Image: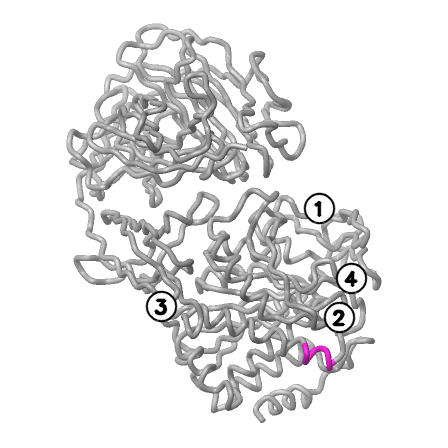
Amino acid sequence: MKKILLILISFLILVPAKGQGLDERYHSVQEINALLDSLDQLEELDGWFLVDTIGFSTQDQLPILAVKISDNVDVKEDEPRVLFVGQVHAEEVLGVETVLDLMNDLLFPSNSIYSHMNILKQFMEIWLVPTANPEGLNVIHEGLDMSYRKNKKDLSPEGPYPNGIFDYNPSIGNDVDGVDLNRNFDFNWTFGDTFLEPDNSDFASHYDYYKGEEPFSEGETIALRDLALENDFVFSIVWHSSRSGNLSEKVFTSWRWEETKDSPDLGIMKTIADHFAGLIETEDGTGTYLSVYSGSRNGKLHDWIYRETGCIQYLVECGTANLQPDSTLIEDTIDRTKPAMVYLMDRTIGYYADAAQITGIVYDASTNQPIEGAIVEIMEQTGLVLKQRTTKEFGRYRRILGPGTYTISIRAEGYLPQEIITVANNSGMTTEDIFLQPAPIYELHIDLIHPPDLVIENSDFILISDFGHDTIFMNTDDNIIFEKPEGAYTVKMLGLPYEKSFFLDHDISIPIEYNFFDGILLSESWPWENSEGPWSAGNVILRSQESLYYDNGDSILSTQWMESEIISITGGLNRIFVTVTHKFETEWEHDPIVVSIRDINNNILGYKSWTGNRWGDYETDYVTATTDTGFNEVKVRLEFTPDQTVNYRGWELQDITLYSWYDEYLGVVETAGGKTPKIPMRINGLYPNPSKGQFHIDLTNFPGGDGTIRIFNLLGQEIKSIDLKKLSPGRQFIDLNINNINGRPLSSGMVFVRVKTANQQVVKKCIILKN
């Protein structure tokens, strides 16, 4: 009866005539808005139903409406949340009806599902966005272009700027106006189509996949982004339909790139997707939807929301190439897809479904108050490609997992970190509340040392920790005292080549020598003659390659490199700084770039390594080397080591300058104190793991100074040892290659990597797989 009421409300609303060929059963934008408004007026839904305007469309400034359904709907509660998005692409209208029908069942459940729906509303918050593209949906309902895909962003045939005309073509493709909203998210955005890029497939959907001039250029994607960041969804579905039919009736899971690179949570996400897809019968009745890996990299919502927030979102291609079927098939499609959506909500709370997940609240052990912003990592399912998973206002963390034993790392600014081991199983949720002890507080004195005749006004420094940075403004006579919790810090001077790292485990005074040093501009002569690889130089810029994207390596040992000429350092100078002004975009964890300072025997005196995405404005990093005896001759080496799959825009360098001087305060805080720090060193990750023999160590809370890396086989025999010399405190990224041991290739099996310092040691296992 209630479903009949909902449909009657829709049809009683006076709206313009439907577009030619579109069944009257489909809801237009006006009908959706009027329907939601009418439901918002129903007294019986008070406290259960809320309509929220989450943003506005780019061109016509139409409101983008979201519905929240829950008990106590006006209050954000400490409950899991799910999100259903009905439509992103204009022509793909089936999802709108699917989401609206789910809303009807939640609000007006029949007797057979009444108890089930009430349980879902009681224990979770359910968000629904019928359409994230109201402009495009209007184009369809007005009958202008039944194959329209994008929003209506005003663009011109002459370029990506407005001309005041809606430039569209009523056939497939060739629509000048509009941005493909599912190419406008910033994760892998660079690979999306550029303006007026033709479609080289047989379908020839020219211009339909334009990514926009920059990520999040569109109001629609901003609305979805902000909703996701605010609500920390556990699961989500975004409905699509495949006009070509090539992708029809499939459920896509993030991600498996180039058949080799998996997302950290792919195992459990794909397991759930398999069950989810198996609940949806195909239109012809001969089987069920197919669960597949998402392999593309081009700014899609489901990849972005997983990477950014941890939400497991499935992209579901609903129906067949018949994108806009008649009312009979609409109802049939709704009935077939509904059990899968309900299953995903059941899986969220473990209601008559596998319940494996770990959840809890992170508390301050001294006050019993929840901690917002605590970083929670499942060490078996983490990676640098993921943004940090942090607790929100309730201190809550939640991770969907498969059955098994897991290591949870919890850290927060001002607290001593913890690691616990716990077990997840399908019979019920695992609750692990965490009580973090406040870290000891120590005084940090920063003293500015400078020539007497030098007047300093507002010199900028930054104090960097794992949780952010403080900006320090100092004048000539300033002596600043901070009270900071125990941990690893770096003081960096902006504008002058100075950086010092230390571990704060007692009161420390840091003298900072403020002076102007003459540097040697090494970038003036690049590309350097001693090099190997496709380096490209021009207009004072050095790039790792000439083309837009770098090529993958032809083997796991492929490294391109470039070395400067030998630089003579005289006068007993004991500190070298190399400033590197650059930007980069490489595959996280797999394609490292390295700047190292070396002696004439190729010994590494100092280095830094980076991977991932920092492709924006040029930023300056410092690489430092120190000695007790004075430097003689050194050189600077650049290295880039892409593996065999997944490439990006690479490395672009604007400036490299080498500075050297005598630092009379060299040893003041370069190494940690003699006691074991309360914040332990740990191996945050070994990547890739399994490995073919070459891998990357992410080592956090290194106390500074010397150490060793020793590698053992299953028999406990040491197969390799590496000395670590005078490393800075804090986080270190170390590349290891154990393909060749004493002239013999390493065979498949398990090895143990042990990192040892004077007072600490940590061990991590790695699987070696050989072809």
Numbered disc 2: secondary structure: helix
* Circles 1 and 4: CB atoms closer than 8 Å: no
Per the image, the residue denoted by label 1 is 194
The circle drawn on residue 643 is none
Per the image, the residue denoted by label 4 is 166
- First of labels 1, 3 by sequence position: 1
Q: CA distance from mark 4 to mark 2?
A: 14 Å
Q: CA distance from mark 1 to mark 4?
A: 19 Å
* Camera-nearest residue between 477 and 602: 602
- First of labels 4, 2 by sequence position: 2
- First of labels 2, 1 by sequence position: 2
What residue occupies the far bottom of the structure in this picture? Answer: 1
- First of labels 1, 4 by sequence position: 4
Per the image, the residue denoted by label 2 is 140
Numbered disc 3: secondary structure: loop
Per the image, the residue denoted by label 3 is 428
* Circles 3 and 4: CB atoms closer than 8 Å: no
- First of labels 3, 4 by sequence position: 4
Residue 678 place in picture, x, y as percent: 19, 41
Image: magenta residue range: 327-332
Q: Does 474 appear above or below 347?
A: above
Label 4 sits on what residue type?
Phe
Q: Quadrant of the N terminus?
A: bottom right
Label 3 sits on what residue type?
Gly
Dot 1: within a 10 Å radius of its alpha carbon, few (fewer than 14), some, or many (20 or more) residues?
some
Q: Residue at x 72, y 49 (%)?
A: 160
Label 1 sits on what residue type?
Thr
* Circles 3 and 2: CB atoms closer than 8 Å: no
